[in-house]
Amino acid sequence: MFLVTGATGGIGRKVVRLLCTQKARVRAFVRLTSRYDELEHRGAELFIGDLREQRDIEKACRGVEYIISSHGSGGDALALDYRANIELIDHAKDNGVKYFVFISVLGADRGYEDAPVFKAKREVERYLQSSGLEYTILRPSGLASNLLPLAESFRKTGLYLLIGDRTNRTSIVSTDDLAKMAVDSVNIPAASNQIFSVGGAEILTREDIPRIFGLIFNREVVIINPPLFLVDGFRSALGLINPQAERALGTFRTLLANEFFCTKEEIAKLEAIFNFRLESLESFLRRHLSI
Ligand SMILES: NC(=O)c1ccc[n+]([C@@H]2O[C@H](COP(=O)([O-])OP(=O)(O)OC[C@H]3O[C@@H](n4cnc5c(N)ncnc54)[C@H](OP(=O)(O)O)[C@@H]3O)[C@@H](O)[C@H]2O)c1
């Protein structure tokens, strides 16, 4: 039995679909407010709970052999990126779980002090590494599925908002490829107790993304490109009324201010270990937008 957290999210939904296709037994951790009908129809067992509740985590882990942690935090890194994962690891140990796959983030090890999500991910990585559980840690760059709403809005307007340096490099990973790696990890000896940087087939600059949108929709591209200091100004003003929201925005700022890409060597290593060719952003978008 696999337990998948974040089962209704960008990665988690694809992980559950893949496991159901493989006829594996899956328990999908969902919230009552989540859109989970499809997962049940595909044959997943639903566990309705909240990852903020230790009791829910404890119950969800009973009878499980594999855990794929792929939930997000919606701004509360301490409760969800950190505490929920620490509890999942503790209960995995108590229940004799065979394998733990953790979706971290590219750059988790760079010591970004102002980015709560990155700090939480790194601490969870360390905790998992010293837990005695067999594990794979996947550190993805940006997910292609996040770009789908932006592509849809570009289709209507031709506009693309790009804050900060347009030439920063990025690797956008196909969410399907990441889900496949998460599922395959448990059966690939070379993935055992390893950390992988996970990107897409090519290294892009941030301005390549609207260029690809323009190509797909055959539309002229208008990039709106405000400088990063506008975000800083907004954050400082927000901090006066809501310090917690200001801190949460630190992760967003970190993502805008830095480069997140995988080297060619890292991509070659992934393709060799997981034994498939990574998908380009253009191909992912064409498949999902039916173009
Ligand atoms: N998106 C990226 O570009 C990116 C890049 C690198 C790493 N990652 C990491 O990849 C993971 C998944 O990202 P994603 O974009 O697939 O996430 P997502 O689409 O935002 O989905 C988040 C999932 O977590 C669930 N969730 C949130 N709070 C919960 C709670 N209190 N209890 C139970 N479930 C809860 C959500 O449930 P609901 O459906 O009920 O909201 C949803 O299923 C995250 O750990 C993220 O840090 C993402």
Image (tube, rainbow, N blue to C red):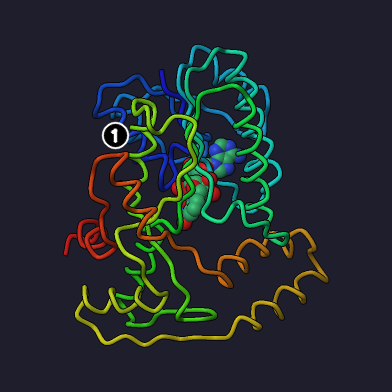
**Left or right: where 109 falls relative to 192:** right
Q: Which residue is drawn at 62% across and 66% down?
A: 254
**Residue 109: x percent and y percent?**
61, 52
Q: Residue furthest front?
A: 265
Please state which amino acid type lies under the numbered disc 1: Leu
Compared to residue 76, the image places residue 55 above or below, namely above
- The image shows a total of numbered marks equal to 1
Residue sitting farthest toward the right = 240
Residue 122 falls in which quadrant of the image?
Answer: top right
Q: How busy is the neighbourhood of tag 1: few (under 14 within 10 Å), some, or many (20 plus)? A: some
Q: Where in the figure is residue 85, as x and y percent of width and height? A: 62, 34
| Most foreground residue, 96 or 53 | 96
Quadrant where the C terminus sits is: bottom left
Q: Name above or below for residue 190 compared with residue 122.
A: above
Where residue 23 sits: x, y (%)?
26, 22
* Residue at (42% x, 40% y) in the render: 12
Which residue is most to the left? Answer: 291
Residue tagged by mark 1?
18
Q: In the picture, residue 192 is in which quadrant?
A: top left
Pick the front one: 115 or 153: 115
* Residue at 60%, 17% in the rendered image: 93
Badge 1 element: helix
Residue 202's quadrant in the figure?
bottom left
- Apparent side of residue 3 relative to residue 133 in the rendered image (left or right): left
Q: Would you say the beta carbon of the disc 1 residue lies within 8 angstroms of ligand 1? A: no
Direction from residue 110 to residue 48 in the image, left or right: left
Given residues 109 and 161, the one toward you in this image is 109
State the quadrant of the N terminus. top left
Q: Where is residue 84 in the image (x, y as percent from the top left)?
A: 64, 34
